[in-house]
Structure formats: C-alpha cells, structure tokens
Image (cartoon, grey):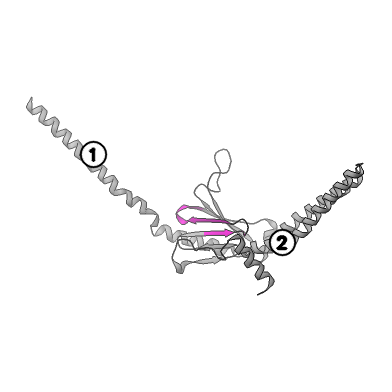
Amino acid sequence: MTVTQWAKEMVLRLARVPAEPHVPEGAKDSVRVFNAGRNYFAWRLIVWGIGNAAIALGLLAAFAFSLILPLPSMVRTIWLALEVGVAGVFVASIPITYFLQRLNYEMRWYIVTDRSLRIRSGVVWVGEMTMTFANIQGIRVNANPIERLLGLANVEVQSAGGGGSDAHGAPSSGHVAKFAGVDNAAVVRDLIVERLRVYRDSGLGEKTVEAREPLALSAAREVLQETRALRNSLAGGLRST
C-alpha cells in the first residue's frame, strides 16, 4: 500500500465516508456508474492554483504595506510576526489542500439506474443528491471555454421547476443534479434520455392515479346512494300528503 492510499483510507475513515455510495432505486442489471473525466482533476488544479496565487499575492501585499507604512517599531514587529505565522500556515496547507483536491476528484460518483440517478461528491463536506425519473423535467449540456479546451462538459438534469425562470426572469425553484466534468457528456445525456423515455412509456408514474381511482368511485357511489334516499324520502312525503 502506497502512502497516498494509506492517507486516503485514513481520511475516509476519519470523515466516516464510505468508499462507494449506495446504489439508488432500480434494477441491479441497469446500474451504470460514471466518473469525472481525467482532465477534470487538471481543471480543479487550475481553480485551486488561482485561489492559492490570490492568497500569496495578498500576503505579499500585506508584507509590502508593513514596510512602507510609517508604523511604530512594536506594531511593525507584531505585524510581521503575524504575517510570518499566516504565511507558514498557508505553505503548510498547500500539500493538504492538494491532496483533498485529488480525493475530491477520485470520490466523485455519478450513478444511473432504470428508475433514478444519484450524485455524490466531496470528502470533508459530502454532498449527495438522488433524483427519480418521475421528477425529471429537462436535461442540458454546458461547458465554459476552459472546460471545452480540456474536453469536458457538464450534464445538468433538472427536476420539476428547476433550471427555469419565472415571469420576472428570476430562477425558479427546483433542483439540478450536475454530472460535472465528464468527458462523455453525450453518452451520459443519451442514456438518461433513453431511460427516461422507457420509464414514462412503461407507465410507472401512473400508479398513484390508479391508487386514487377506487376512492373516487367509492365517494361517487355514496353520493348516489344519498341522492336516491333523499328522492325516495321526498316521494314518500308527497304520497302521504
């Protein structure tokens, strides 16, 4: 076992995160598992590097201002000591945050069955979303210029009310399940579209209507019986007079 694998197991154990997510509702032979593309890790490193560069520039600017500003010697000493401490923490955190970026890439799961889909991501802060085909309203693929350059795209699956806008142009309520950074977006989209079509053609979403129908018929029969009883009562009263 390598040091990286050992560290990964330790982090997962401490965070109490299972190595693999549970499969959502659906037939076992219909399970398809997708992961982020190889270049997704490069994309995350680009974002991570930009963030670290911004922090480093901020520390350098603070150090420069501490030398330029006319501060008392005691204040300058305290200021420089604080900057050195913050810079030390920042440098020490670089390998840790890099490792977490790697884990975030490896622990990103996209699962599709014949009835639902599930997305799980994150290690320290774990996010998981499950969406049934009964609630899916739309599917779209998008990518920014850098993602397109890396051969990546995002497949967004919108639930009822998700991803649209109201009359004032504001985003409407709903949920969006995002297959982020996949390098086979067309395959993922076509699979979901086909399974959604099969799911709707099979009539699985009509069970709730069938469950309500006997209640409606029972209520109608009761109304009919009461109407007949009232009619008979009125007819009997008229005959007696």
Q: Is residue 171 found left or right of 197 in the rendered image?
A: right
Q: Is residue 12 magenta?
A: no
Q: Which dot marks residue 96?
A: 2
Q: Residue 73's spot in the image, x, y percent?
A: 92, 44
Pick the quarter of the image with the N terminus: bottom right
Q: Percent x, y for residue 210?
A: 33, 52
Compared with 183, 58 (above or below) is: above
Q: Is residue 150 visible?
A: no
Q: Which residue is found at the position 80% from the left and 56% from the top? A: 88
Seen as rendered, the residue at the extreme front is 74
User: Residue 104 location, x and y as percent?
Assistant: 64, 61
Give yes or no for residue 131 being in the magenta stretch.
yes
Q: In this rendering, which labeled residue sits more in front, label 1 or label 2?
A: 2
Badge 2, how many Cα within 10 Å: few under 14, some, many 20+? few
Q: Quadrant of residue 141?
A: bottom right
Secondary-structure class at tag 2: helix
| Boundaries of the magenta span | 118-137
Q: Disc 2 marks which amino acid? A: Ile
Seen at 23% across and 39% down, the residue is: 223
What residue occupies the far bottom of the structure in this picture? 1
Question: Could you tell me the amino acid type at mark 1?
Answer: Val
Residue receiving disc 1: 223
> On the image, which quarter does residue 235 sit in?
top left
Which element type, helix, strand or loop, lies under badge 1? helix
Marks 1 and 2: CB-CB under 8 Å? Answer: no
Q: Is residue 79 left or right of residue 144?
A: right
Count the numbered circles shown.
Answer: 2
